[in-house]
Each structure stands twice: as structure tokens, then as C-alpha cells.
Image (cartoon, rainbow, N blue to C red):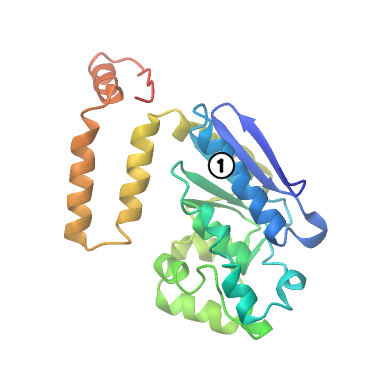
Amino acid sequence: MSKLVITEVHGKVGLIRISRPEALNALNNEVVDGIGAAIDGFEADENIGCIVLTGNEKAFAAGADIGFMKDFDYMHAYKTDFITRNWERIKTTRKPVIAAVAGFALGGGCEMAMMCDMIFAADTAKFGQPEIRLGTMPGAGGTQRLPRAVGKAKAMDLCLTARMMDAAEAEKAGLVARIIPAEQLLDETLKAAATIAGFSLPVVMMIKESVNRAFESSLNEGLLFERRVFHSAFALEDQKEGMAAFVEKRKPAFRNC
């Protein structure tokens, strides 16, 4: 595991913390590979039902490490499959991932947060895609995920002017699920993650996959996918337990099967 990425286990929640404070958690291959390794570990751990990705109070991640990539040429970026090779591991995680964002989430940091399933923002959070200032453009989803989250007009504004968006604007625009006072961010995020992890993991994964399908298909195709997955849930022991517990007015004891 990279020394730049710290992992902790909180009950059924896996916590991944980017720890490169001297660089405002700027992302390079060591950091991103460390995040990927941590995700691999939590995906393989049957006790873990939800993952939280965070930074520190000053920055979730202030962007990709410019010093790391400033001398790249086209063939190096292409042949090493820059970004796709390791950043996308977050996107392929089957368990839910919550980004807990305080301070700066800029450029690659904003894009990494958007790869997660939802963003909980401290009231100090700042989001932006300032790549245009560097003579380049977003390359990890800033021109693709951001419009899906906040709409074309606001995505154009952020990407073309390089301005930052605060937490209140980000929530209003649909980028952020919750705003939390900075001093409570991690505790409240871990509580929400623990709630998710307390449900049936197969159902949690079904819901995540179905919501994601909404962005990859037409409405009718998405509805058909949802309906078939819903039907399949009746094969789960957890469905029998959950409905029986409701009828019997008791708390369900899910077994993830």
C-alpha cells in the first residue's frame, strides 16, 4: 500500500484517505495506484459494505500533479493509457463509494470525486475544472460527468472560465448530495456509509448498478433493466427476511445472500 494512501476500517465501512498534504493531495500514479489497491482490498472483504474516499480539511485533491505530467508527450500518454489504466478503478467498484470532500476538489480531484457514487461536501468545499489555465482540458471526465451532473451551461462555465464553485452552488446544481459542517464531515459521512452497509449488500449493488444504467441507456431500456433486477431480488434470502421483518414489526437480520 502506498504511504500516500491510508486505509481504515470502521465497522462495515472502508475508509480511504489521500495523504499528501504538502501537495494539497495532488494526484499522481502512486496516489491513484494506492487508491486502486485499497479499493481492491475492500471489494474482496465480505465484511465491507460501503467505501468512503476522502482527503483532509484543506483539500480532497487539488488536481492532478502537474509536475508529474508536464513532460508527457502524446505517445507516452497513449501507450501508458494515462488515466484509464488506474483512475477508472473507482468507476468499476461494485460497492458504493462516497466522496467526502472538504477544501479543494479541482481538476482531477473534482473528476475523481465525480467517479464516486455520491459526494458529501463540507461547507468549505470548492469544486472546479481549471485545466484551461494550463493550456489543456479535463481528461478524467470533466467534460462528460460534469454536464451529466450539473447541466451543459454550468459545465461550460466551469470548464471554460476555470472559476470555482462553492458547496452551496454545487448542491443546488446537483453535483453534491449533502452539505455538512466541515468539522462533522467525516463523522456524518461514515454514519451514512454505515447505514448503507447495514442493508443487504446484493440489493445495494443492484441499486447502484440500476441507477448507473439510467445514464447509459434510454428510459425504456433502463426501466426494463430495473424491472428484471427487481424481479431477481425475489430470489434473495434477504428479500424474504426483509419483508418478513416488516410484517412482524422487527428489525431485519440481513445475511447478504
**Disc 1 residue crowd, few under 14, some 14–19, many 20+, Cα 10 Å:** some
Q: Is residue 48 above or below residue 205?
A: above
Residue that protrudes farthest toward the bottom in the picture: 135
Q: Position of residue 72 (x, y in %)?
A: 69, 77
Taking the image as shown, residue 21 lies to the left or right of residue 147, namely right
* Residue 23: x %, y % from top left: 79, 61
SS at circle 1: helix
Circle 1 is placed at which residue position? Answer: 40
Query: In the depicted view, which residue is nearer to us: 146 or 85?
Result: 85
Residue 181 seen from this side: no
Q: Going 18% across and 45% down the picture, which residue do you hit?
A: 227
Q: Is residue 164 above or below residue 54?
A: below
Q: Nearer the viewer, residue 146 or 163?
A: 146
The answer to whether 51 appears left or right of 200 in the picture is right
Image quarter hosting the N terminus = top right
**Residue sitting at x 33%, y 41%:** 206
Name the amino acid, label 1.
Asp
Question: Residue 79 in the image: x percent, y percent?
Answer: 58, 71
Q: Nearer the viewer, residue 25 or 100?
A: 25
Residue at 63% over, 31% down: 9
